[in-house]
Image: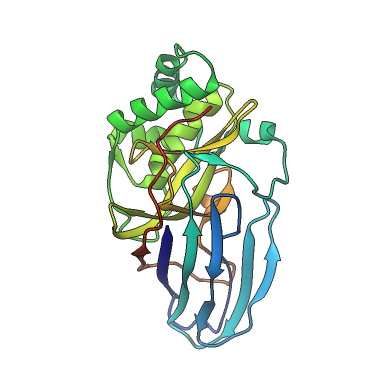
Amino acid sequence: MRVRIYHQIIHKLEPGLRIATATIKLTPRNHEGQHIVRWPLDVQPDCRLYSHEDAFGNLCHTFSVEGPLDHITLLAEGDVETRDMTGVVRGTVERFPPSLFLRQTDFTMPDAAIETLAGEAAAADGPLAQAHALMALVHDAIDEIPVESAALARAAAAVLAEGEGTSGEIAHVFTAAARHLRIPARHISGYATQDDEPGTAREWAEVHVPKLGWVAFDCGRKVCATEEHVRVAVALDSLGVAPVRGTGINTSEEATANAVSYSSRHGQSQSQTQE
């Protein structure tokens, strides 16, 4: 499948700001399930982008612009060839052992309700079956809602208690429960289409299964990642994969806008099976 992506972010600044510096994580990498055909980045007002990799191997760009400014516009667009790996992720940059991803964060700290949810999944036979059982439980417990602003995703406990959350917030719940079961789990940002319709920026999770490797679980859709998913960044939680992190004084992300459009399909999707 070829996925065409158009992602625009309007990063609003407080009045009177004279200089803004930010780091963006909007560039996907090649791996066995995806090949980047083209991927230009643009920042307005015009400035120089400095590329680097973070500790997780994510492709990042840092820039500074001088004001006075009231907003910065970021545009990432391009084409990505994808193929269905039945959720299995291979050929990615791996800087850390899977055990690092047992570490809970403020966003994934489990409470009693999450531990109970994890306990229900623990009855399944082995980490892969437990992850599938956990995905079904999380999907049934939380209704997905769209992302309407640039606000940070909420912590897992609050999302489960509320019974609704964005794709990133649902991933927090899944990750918190998986780590409680001692299954390494990490947070992923990217894009996804669905049923040949325009899609959106999206977040999901990956868990590490012995002898199989990393497997991607999109609990909001109750599916392992398919050819309709484009993987961008990895971290311990949504904060680590945020597309824009401002480091200038008095900056704030007040609004975002993004869109993803589907281009063309090549061949048929594989079945959702893993070995």
Viewer-proximal residue among 272 and 121: 272
Q: Residue at x 50, y 36 (%)?
A: 108
Residue 12 image point, x, y percent:
42, 74
Name the outermost residue toward the front: 267
The answer to whether 64 is drawn above or below residue 223 in the figure is: below
Residue 190 image point, x, y percent:
47, 55
Viewer-proximal residue among 60 and 262: 262
Q: Quarter of the image for the N terminus: give it.
A: bottom left
Q: Residue at x 28, y 52 (%)?
A: 195
Residue 217 image point, x, y percent:
45, 37
Viewer-proximal residue among 82 and 15: 82
Residue 217 in sight:
yes
Quarter of the view holding residue 98: top right
The answer to whether 17 is drawn above or below residue 26 in the figure is: below
The colour scheme is rainbow
Q: Residue at x 52, y 44 (%)?
A: 187
Residue 132 image point, x, y percent:
43, 26
Question: What is the number of callouts on the image?
Answer: 0
Is 23 placed left or right of 151 in the picture? Answer: right
